Image (cartoon, grey):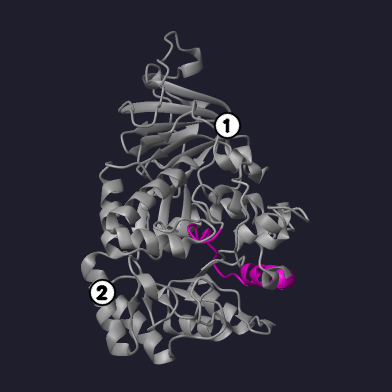
Amino acid sequence: MVFSRTDGVTARGAARRPAAVLLRPGDPAPDRYLITADRVWDGVAPEPVRDGFLLVEGARIGAVGRQADLGGDLDTVPRLDLPGATVLPGLIDCHVHMALSGSATPVRDFKREARAGAAALAVRAVQNLRRAAEAGVTTVRDLGTPNEVAFPLRAAVAEGRIPGPRVLTSGQPITVTGGHCHWFSHQCDSPAEIRVAVRRQVRDGADWIKLMLSGGNLTPRTNPGRPQYSEEEVRACVEESERLGVPVSAHAYDPVSIRRAVDAGVRTIEHCLFETADGIAYDPATAIQMAARGIAFVPTISGAFLRMRTAGPEGPEGPDLVAPRFRERRTQIREVFRRMVAAGVPMVAGSDAGVPQRAFDGFPADLAALVGPDGMGLTCRQALVAATSAAAERLGVDDTGVLAPGRRADVLAVDGDPLSDIGAVVRPRLVLTAGRPVRGPESAPSPAARGATDGRRRESDGSGT
């Protein structure tokens, strides 16, 4: 949208020079200021606006357009100039676990900290949220954190008491007795028990319901290749959630679990590999049904794509960081995701941050790994849409994901042009969450931008929880 001239005089030709804005994390920002950059991309358009501007008014966007169309009434508005940069919507990570460490042993870490109490888990989550925000993530959907941590932290971020991205959260997931992630979930073994768990989560404030439909890789003695729940049980979860106006996200690896999730009408399917004990068994009919019903998939595999692309043959960053099963099946998995996108299945980006080798500041690099022949074959724009406007739409938040007047000032500025070079997303210069600066132009580079690593050998099965 263009902010029209009001007196025919552009800011470039104005006699008065606007004051420079210095945005520092933790300091209050001006009530009203301009950001100018070489490019401004709104999260939707095919191309960015060249020599663009963004007007920030408190927590909201006042206007966005070309600098050439700035009116004279904005001559004295304080200004932050970002030459060489692109301004775009803040990123949305649709799958995180904010109380998990992302270390080699996140389950062990979680259980140790849980024994110390909810405060220890909250400290971990606060650190994770801050790292995510500093990397350019302005909204996260948390799909598995104890209620006593998840809901107070969501409120603390919303009230500005701690820095971080906006949090949408399921709180505690629903799983079977001894099932995937049973150590922080409701354990339910019948439709009636599932309905009670849904009611409790909605009562306590859940934005989403998370159903562990299949087993998972983090939990020994569960089976990622087989369903944990029957068709009747999955339907009970979705029916009760729909009655209460809360959407359902299903953790599902195998074709049968995915099909049950689709038939029941969940909103998103996490992982969605169509994986069995014998390999990958893609079902085109299921994908067609997902496309017809607008059920999105969240391929939390980008971290493994990234490691396969960058790992050397030996040493602590060698191919052992990716599980043998994924290395063997990576071509099939890549083809499954490409076929789903080609079939029109909505895709949104999520990192699974918190599980092994999923750092909270790694989402931009994971997003970049989806682009090109070594990833999912996405274009730069497709990847960015999956983490901005499309993500906001699928998560049901209509006030972010797009730079437009009236939307939240969730803003990321990066060096370069990520629409032509996706690697620019790992070079953040400015991050605003609801107008609050969490990263300023003078901040140090993020670990992803520096290519930093802690040098330790880590374990991962390459596919997430």
Q: Amino acid at mark 2?
A: Leu
The mark that comes first in sequence, 2 or 1, is 1
- Height in image: 373 above or below 137? below
Q: Is residue 459 above or below residue 235?
A: above
Question: Magenta part of the protein: which range?
Answer: 328-356
Tell me, yes or no, if residue 399 can be seen here: no
For the residue pair 15 and 326, the one nearer the viewer reads as 326
Q: Is residue 254 above or below residue 407?
A: below
Horizontal side of residue 325 vs 35, given as left or right: right
Residue drawn where x is 34% and y is 39% of the image: 60
Q: What kind of element bears circle 2?
A: loop
Q: Is residue 54 magenta?
A: no
In the rendered structure, which amino acid carries the disc numbered 1? Answer: Ala
* 405, 29: nearer the viewer: 29
x then y, percent, for residue 182: 39, 75
Residue placed under numbered mark 2 in the picture:
244
In the rendered view, tell whether residue 111 sits above or below residue 133: below
Q: Is residue 405 visible?
A: yes
Which residue is found at the position 56% from the left and 73% from the top? 272
Circle 2 packing at 10 Å, graded few (<14), some (14-19), many (20+), is: few
Indicate the position of residue 18 as horizontal and vertical percent values: 41, 15
Q: On the image, numbered disc 1 is attached to which residue?
A: 85
Secondary element under disc 1, as helix, strand or loop, is strand
